[in-house]
Amino acid sequence: MDQQVTNLDRELRARALRVIPGAMWGHQNALRLPEGYPQYFTRTEGCRTWDSNGREYIDFICGWGPMILGYNDPDVEAAAVRQRSNGDCMNGPSERLVELAELVVETVPHADWAMFSKNGTDATTACITIARAGTGRRKVLLARGAYHGAIPWCTPSVAGVTEEDRAHLAYFEYNDAASLEALVEANKGDIAAIVVSAFRHDLGKDHELPTPEFARRARELADEANAALIVDDVRAGFRLDMGGSWEVVGVRPDLAAWSKAIANGHALAAVTGNDRFRDAATRIYTTGSFWTASVSMAAAIATIKKLRDTDGIGKMRTAGQRLRDGLEAQALRHGLKIRQTGPVQMPVILFDDDADRRLGNAFCLEALARGVYLHPTHTMFLSAAHTNADIDAALQATDEAFAAVARL
Ligand code: PMP
């Protein structure tokens, strides 16, 4: 590799700094990762990604979740290309819109209808707007620390945000029914919605599936208050259950927000809802220049059908379990204490006694140097394209990475 190529990432960052504030925004700013992570990428295929310096990685971030069947999945891309040759952004939607809504309603048990947009934030925001329109109430109860998007009502930053942007939001603890009960009591008569993530997947924290007791109680409390139960399935949608993530605990929301994986990397988000909120969803005004574009809808139709017909979730579970078991054995052998939490197909790996992230960061950097792209604090993602051979190759790298951490 010549010098010019190996320095492309550094060169692009320097150029970006002149024309892009901070060189990059949000969670994709590589400065939020341990130094040594690449900022720029040139290519993806299957479960692999190549950075701008030409280095290849087995990818466990999957474009932060959107890749679920494999990058450049041939069936999804064929559907996208076919649609693109006819039209994408037109004066209105194509037939794909109705086909996709029909498929989503058929796939997701709580859904009597679906609407589409582009980003997860579009979908979470629309859910809340629909809940308020449907109930005529103001208060939205949220789990403390949960991420729902990046506009003033929900962004983790306070810069540029006013108190008024977050008026009528109140916080309970995820999986703590008593804290939700108390919050419902305190806001009685004015509750529009209870919002829950698919599971607790807060940055840098152990991940936690919803307990059936908490999920059932959230449903009951929403019903008693005549409020909407909203599941934010943006991150987990189609990785836990094709019918929506709370199917695993047998609880159905009134509204759910989806994005990330639903079109295997094509830009699309969805709101699903039941008939109770159909009229409210009709009355709110929500739209976007690209929300009816057809290519991502064609991609979503192909993605959902392929995930369903090829047991995509089963494949992700198998790969995730193989990774988890391998890492567990390796950590033990190297005398390191790690916690692997979350569903196996959406893991987070944290080290014990590592408040300053010294061990976690070092582990991820050592893995990165050996061609495995992990994240030290964020939910990671398995895909249906991670084969046993890919997992085993990744485990070879992580074994060496653990050995290096053990020497620290
Ligand atoms: N909700 C959850 C649970 C998410 O993980 C995300 C994105 N990480 C969002 C909402 C916002 O989605 P987007 O970034 O596409 O707006």
Image (cartoon, rainbow, N blue to C red):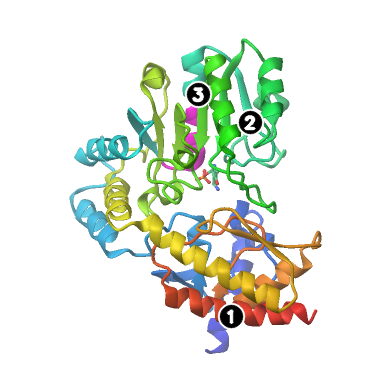
Q: CA distance from mark 3 to mark 2?
A: 14 Å
The residue shown at (26%, 48%) is 298
Q: Is residue 83 above or below residue 397?
A: above
Disc number for residue 397: 1
- Locate residue 127 relative to residue 378 in the image: left or right: left
Which amino acid, mark 2? Leu
Q: Residues within 10 Å of mark 2 (few under 14, many from 20)?
A: many
- The answer to which quarter of the image holds residue 281 is top left
* Above or below: residue 208 compared with residue 169: below
Q: Residues within 10 Å of mark 3 (few under 14, many from 20)?
A: some
Mark 2 residue's CB less than 8 Å from ligand 1? no
Residue of label 2 = 142
* Mark nearer the N terminus (2 vs 1): 2
Specify the farthest residue to the bottom. Answer: 2
Q: Quadrant of the C terminus?
A: bottom right
**Start and end of the magenta stretch?**
118-129
Q: Specify the amino acid type for callout 1.
A: Ala
- Marks 3/1: CA distance? 46 Å
Residue 140 colored magenta?
Answer: no
Q: Give the mark, 3 or 1, whose residue is nearer the N terminus.
A: 3
| Left or right of residue 8, residue 73 in this image | left
Q: Which mark is residue 129?
A: 3
- Report helix, strand or loop for mark 2: strand
Q: Picture coordinates of residue 63 (x, y %)? A: 49, 59
Left or right for 334, reference 267: right
Residue 55 visible in the current orientation:
no
